[in-house]
Image (cartoon, rainbow, N blue to C red):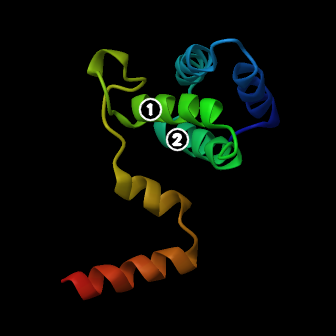
Amino acid sequence: MISDAIRNRFQLALGQPSPFDSLYNLAVALKAEGISQLEMYHLFNEFRAKLAHDERLEDAVLDTMDLIVGCGHRGYWIFEQELDRRLYDKAFMSPDEKEQKRDRDDLAS
């Protein structure tokens, strides 16, 4: 579970002169504190949705999210493995979204 204290740290990182560097360092620190890859992705995605009006900050969040999920240069990945999208779907999709996905998957097969 992501606490308000972690969300406050995220807000502080966004306010730094180099938000990407600050967010990357925050992600590394959160991993060291035991935040899972899936929880971290959810946190960053939550803020990404709120920042659509600010391209600079949204880009910093998206660039960090790439490294959380295992895209980009492997030496900069936050986690050792790529995020399995099926885990994300299982953890964060609403029941309605899960049903819609099942329907799409049924149509595709």
Q: Residues within 10 Å of mark 2 (few under 14, many from 20)?
A: many
Tell me if residue 6 comes above or below residue 88 in the rendering: above
Let me know if residue 35 appears in the view.
Answer: no
Residue that carries the numbered disc 1 in the rendered image: 68
Let me know if residue 93 appears in the view.
Answer: yes
Instruction: Say which residue appears at 57% left-offset and 33% top-offset.
Output: 61
Q: Amino acid at mark 2?
A: Tyr
- Judging depth in this view, the residue of 31 and 96 nearest the camera is 96
Q: Residues within 10 Å of mark 1 (few under 14, many from 20)?
A: many
The quadrant in which the N terminus is found is top right
The quadrant in which the C terminus is found is bottom left
Whichever of callouts 2 and 1 sits on the residue coming sooner in the sequence is: 2
Instruction: Say which residue appears at 44% left-offset and 32% top-offset.
Output: 68
> In the rendered structure, are the residues bearing label 2 and label 1 in contact, judged by CB atoms less than 8 Å apart?
yes
Snapshot quadrant of residue 104:
bottom left
Residue 51 spot, x, y in % from top left:
68, 42
Q: Secondary structure at mark 1?
A: helix
Q: What count of labels does the image hold?
A: 2
Could you tell me how far apart the alpha carbons at marks 2 and 1 are, in whole angstroms? Answer: 7 Å
- Judging depth in this view, the residue of 105 and 31 nearest the camera is 105
Residue that carries the numbered disc 2 in the rendered image: 41
Instruction: Say which residue appears at 30% left-offset and 32% top-offset.
Output: 81
Residue 94 spot, x, y in % from top left:
58, 71
Q: Secondary structure at mark 2?
A: helix
Q: Amino acid at mark 1?
A: Ile
Check the image and name the residue furthest to the left. 109
